[in-house]
Amino acid sequence: MAVLEDLKGAVDHLRTTLWAAMSANTDDPDKLTSKLVSLRLQRAAEICLQIRLDVDANEVDISSAELPKLREALHLTVNRVERLYKSGM
């Protein structure tokens, strides 16, 4: 069931992203970029929530092969987001 939920989330994200790209004003690429970034941030938050749930359910442990790569990606991302907040931009 969890695999189907993940697949549904990915398909929903793809559908929403395609809709945003197709319906965007092609004369304003900044508007499209802003919408795509917004959708990407929303999907990332959803994925992080699911990962937290997986960790809480003991579906992820220290021996998970992908964990070091995820840890590094999250660390670098959090550092950049914190820098962004501190800059006030």
Image: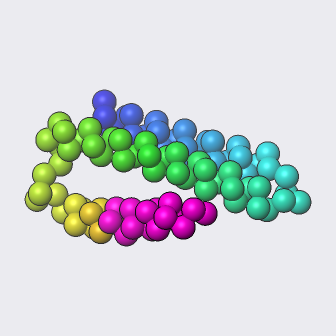
Please name the residue shown 52% across and 45% down the image: 42
The C terminus - image quarter: bottom right
Of residue 79 and residue 48, the one placed in the foreground of this image is 79
User: Please, is residue 43 above or below residue 63 in the view?
Assistant: above
- The residue positioned 64% from the left and 54% from the top of the image is 36
Along the viewing direction, whichever of 23 and 34 lies nearer the viewer: 34
Judge whether residue 71 is colored magenta.
no
- Residue appearing at x 34%, y 62% in the figure: 74
Residue 81 at x, y percent in the picture: 46, 62
Q: Position of residue 60 (x, y in %)?
A: 17, 48
For the view shown, which residue lies furthest in the right direction?
27
- Residue 82, position in %: x, y? 43, 63
Is residue 26 positioned above or below 52 on the image?
below
> What type of secondary structure mainly makes up the magenta span?
helix
Res. 77 visible in picture: no
Q: Estimate the x, y position of residue 79 in percent, counting from the top left.
A: 39, 67
Magenta stretch in the rendered image: 74-89
Q: How is the image coloured?
A: rainbow
The reply to whether residue 82 is visible in this rendering is yes
| Quarter holding residue 71 | bottom left
Q: From the image, which quarter does the N terminus lie in?
A: top left
Judge left or right: residue 30 versus residue 54.
right
> Where, by quadrant of the figure, is residue 62 drawn?
bottom left
